[in-house]
Image: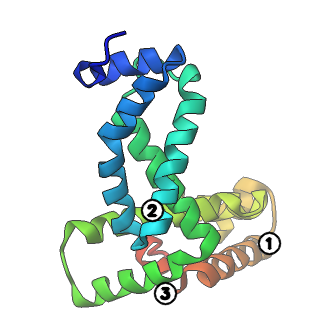
Amino acid sequence: MPSAYNQHSDEQLLALIKSGDRKACSEVYERYWPLLYRHAIKMLRNGDESEDVVQDVFVNFWKKAPDLEDSTSVGAYLYTATRNRILNLFTRNNVHINYLNDLGDFMKDGYEVTDHLVREKILAGLIEAEIQKLPTRMREVFELKRKQNLSYKEIAEKMDISELTVKTQMNKAITILRSKFGDHLSVFLPFL
């Protein structure tokens, strides 16, 4: 292959990477590293963590490239992988507590900025991930209330359990979620 990898499209580079071409992967790295790093630094506000996240994304991209579909958008794949790594880091390191405080300040001050909307979307994703971690029966009760807005009685009939069990499961679910997200939870789950 000629050394002019920078003339190749992302699709061509992906095909080369899938066949084990390290120079093609280096070109993708050169192309996307600055963008992904800027995104990570905005989210994490820490240069070292941002570098680590982006480096991990590229290492995993190299490992997973042979299994990717030929039609995979390299840019979208890398951006999504970076976002997911950052969200995992938030969860693991409790960085999301600082993030929630910032979001609360934004909500109180009423700023209508794109960053605010992005933060809301990320928080909604974190809440959704925690809902999916609830025990099965508790999650089912919670989802019937949240998505179908059923009464406790209707949920009890649908699940063939007592209303008291429904109420207990809902209270436990809300307690678990509030312990992780505090007052921010009611913004995303208005029925609380």
Q: Label 1 near label 3: C-beta < 8 Å?
A: no
Q: Which residue is mark 1?
A: 165
Where residue 103 sits, quadrant-wise, is bottom left
Residue 183 is tagged as 3
State the SS at label 2.
helix
Instruction: Measure the C-alpha gap from mark 3 to mark 1.
Output: 25 Å
Name which residue lies at 58% across and 60% down: 88
Q: Position of residue 166 (x, y in %)?
A: 73, 70
Q: Which residue is mark 2?
A: 50
Name which residue lies at 61% across and 79% down: 180
Q: Nearer the viewer, mark 3 or mark 1?
A: 3
Name which residue lies at 31% across and 18% down: 3
**Position above or below: 174 against 65:** below
Which is nearer the N-term, disc 1 or disc 2?
2
Q: In the current view of this chain or complex, which residue is farthest to the top?
A: 1
Q: Position of residue 125 (x, y in %)?
A: 49, 60
Q: Label 2 near label 3: C-beta < 8 Å?
A: no
